[in-house]
Image (tube, rainbow, N blue to C red):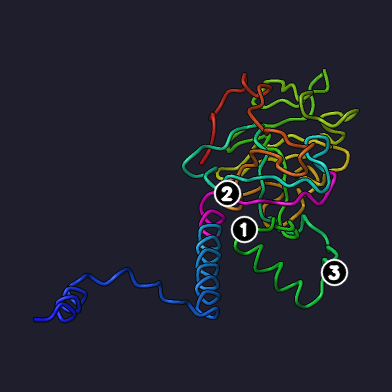
Amino acid sequence: MSADQGAQQDAAQQPAGPRPPARRSPGGGVLAAVKETVLVVAVALVVSLVVKTFLLQAFFIPSQSMEQTLDIGDRVIVSKLTPGPFELHRGDVVVFSDPGGWLGETAPTRRGAVGTVVAEVLTFVGLLPEDSDDHLIKRVVGLPGDHVVCCDAQGLITVNDTPVDESAYLAAGAVPSERAFDVVVPEGELWVMGDNRPESADSRYNTDSEPYHGFVPVDLVVGRAHAVVWPLPHWAWLGHQSGFDGVGGVPGTK
């Protein structure tokens, strides 16, 4: 074997060097990025829908009935686990569906056709707060079975003969109620009032409304408002109200 033939044979036996990576077409990279983005967005929408359906939901405050606790334009986070796994208590702020006749005609939000569709989709999956057109937000004053009266000699509302100190949340200058009432809350229902009492068309002003006469069925409660989350300067935790601590009767309801 000649020297040239030996060199050629040795070269043939040498392992091949690393191959250069295959080039991706620009179109394939863009398509992969689009697929990944669509997948991420789809997962986010599903998770948001599940959270809205079973856990939390955002609501927009459209009126002054809960000032100064809640201002017009505030966004609140509502837990849908109360009532349910967790009990509803006196003093809790709740969002509920209109029991019938509480809300008058509301002017629809003006949007274009595309804007309306986008807003409805984002609201449906929980990425936009509900506009509250058919919901109300008030404070629970009476639970099922409670005897709620306005007012005692000191001008305070009493629940089961116990005066309630509401100074922690009533609007500045507001009295507990300008209208007298004496009610016993039916089983499975609530007596609710706004914190801005002179500007709140609540249980007191709906006693002639059918079919619940001012009371709110627990079944119509969407959930308990836990916090103001927007705008940021208004951030606040809507916690326990100690003014009801001395009230007897059932401590809560599901």
View extreme (front): residue? 2
The residue at which mark 1 appears reads as 126
What is the secondary structure assignment of the residue under circle 3? loop
Quadrant of residue 189 within the rendered picture:
top right
Where residue 150 appears, as percent x and y from the top left, is 78, 30
Does the residue at mark 1 contact the one at mark 2 (Cβ under 8 Å)?
yes
Mark nearer the N terminus (3 vs 2): 2
Mark nearer the N terminus (1 vs 2): 2
| Residue under the image location 55 percent in, 67 percent down | 37
View extreme (right): residue? 173
Q: Which residues are magenta?
A: 49-64
View extreme (left): residue? 1
Q: Is residue 62 above or below residue 174?
A: below
Residue 110 marker: 3
Residue 56 marker: 2
Foreground pick, 39 / 165: 39
| Residue under the image location 75 percent in, 48 percent down | 207
Foreground pick, 153 / 23: 23
